[in-house]
Amino acid sequence: MSNSDSKPARTWRPRTQAVRGGLSRTNFRETSEAMFMNSGYVYDSAEEAEASFDGTLDRMVYSRFKNPTIAVFEQRLAEIEGAPACRATASGMAAVHAALLCQLKAGDRVVASNALFGSCHWIINELLPRYGIERVFVDGTDLKSWEAALSRPTACVFLETPSNPTLEIIDLAAVCDLAHKAGAKVVVDNVFATPILQSPLELGADIVVYSATKHIDGQGRCLGGAVLGSTEFCADILGPFLRNTGPCMSPFNAWVLLKGLETLDLRMERHCSNALKLARFLETRGEVARVLYPGLESHPQHDLAKRQMRGWGSIVALELKGGKQAAYDLLNGLDLIDISNNLGDAKSLITHPWTTTHQRLSPEDKLSMGITEGLLRLSVGLEDGDDLADDIAQALES
Ligand SMILES: *Cc1c(COP(=O)(O)O)cnc(C)c1O
């Protein structure tokens, strides 16, 4: 691998980093990034192998530890995020699991917001207690309940903002402040905002996690995840955990995802403008009881979203007056928008959280998270926004 074209990368702005960050061309001088689909590496001598393992020689030894294509993805995402370091994982859930378990031990305490992605909720609610880790859930929008929960020493805070599917906004700066006073490291699931719309590290968070499956790929092709944080955290705490437990990203997926990063900013622009257009359109429809979108003045935390985000994202939630039947009628009447539980895709996708993504929660838990039987979550894609509005209008009328 040639480093002859390494440039002063850190001075570039995020949009340039998205296209060129981490680029390291081989001697063939290819334009686009090469894909290294190899598990292992060879050594020219026994001495070189020894030096590679005792750390005197910094080189690739095994793709569970390090791979050139995965390294480009990691460096590029770190540059966009403005994070000192990044480690890629096989999926978003592998990232969440590793980010938490690598730093927690029996007797620790974790405080988390209540409105979480289903599997994140499962890890904190079901898995952590098996290892003797205490967990406390709070209403993420209520600073008083964060304050009460963080009045005792705490190892870790986990939260998601905007939340899935009701788009609650958590005050990152205020919660990070309370968490640090309690001695906690703050882990933020930044999937809905993406690095383009929100920078949790700048607001005080210690660690950011992504499902790269969502907007970073954004084209429904592969799974991936990432954990970003300080160099010490990634090298000394997360690194050994990943190296020895093995939830590594495939080099093929890393290549797909690093190409996804090149267009992420452009795609988010269209996602956001389409979503705002649809949110405003839905507000005019009599069949719709409420529309939840951080960009609407009617959103209860619109001002907070404006302070900590650079855009409102691709997800709109809407509640139909006619409950579950009206929600199903709308889903079944759609022609263009697909029924799917994925999100952040180029294709617009819609789901009924009560019976799909959040089906396993009790009715009381769903209602406490603002999920009603008439609620739909719409992931607004890159199509023409007028076609999307037309499709929803004809489905509401049919
Ligand atoms: C999808 C998602 C995850 C999990 O990511 P996978 O890549 O599906 O494992 C975690 N958090 C949020 C907010 C998500 O939307």
Image: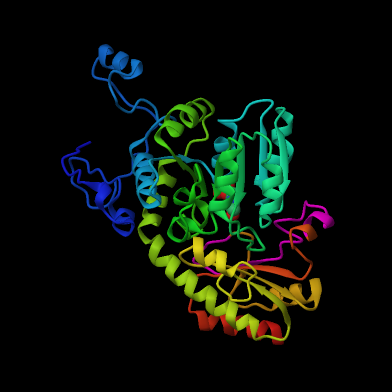
- Residue 395 lies in what quarter of the image? bottom right
Residue 174: x and y in percent read 57, 52
- The quarter of the picture where the N terminus appears is top left
- Residue 141 screen position, x and y as percent: 66, 57
The boundaries of the magenta stretch are 343-366
Asked which quadrant contains residue 103, the reply is top right
The residue sitting at 41% across, 45% down in the picture is 254
Q: How many marks?
A: 0
Task: From this view, report whether residue 14 is shown above or below residue 105.
Answer: below
Q: Main secondary structure of the magenta part?
A: loop
274 vs 136, left or right, is left
**Residue at the image position 55 percent from the left and 72 percent from the top:** 295
Render colour scheme: rainbow
Task: Specify whether residue 58 is in view.
Answer: yes
The relative height of residue 160 versus residue 184 in the rendered view (above or below) is: below
Residue 347 shown in magenta: yes
Is residue 379 visible in the rendered image? The answer is: no
Residue lying farthest left? Answer: 4
Residue drawn 53% across and 79% down?
Answer: 277
On screen, residue 314 versus residue 21, left or right, reads right
Quarter assignment of residue 398: bottom right
Q: Residue at 37% x, 28% y: name it.
A: 40
Residue 346: x and y in percent read 49, 66
In the picture, measured across the screen, residue 292 lies left or right of residue 365, that is left
Q: Position of residue 359 (x, y in %)?
A: 76, 55
Q: Is residue 144 magenta?
A: no
In this view of the protein, which residue sits in the foreground, 220 or 228? Answer: 228
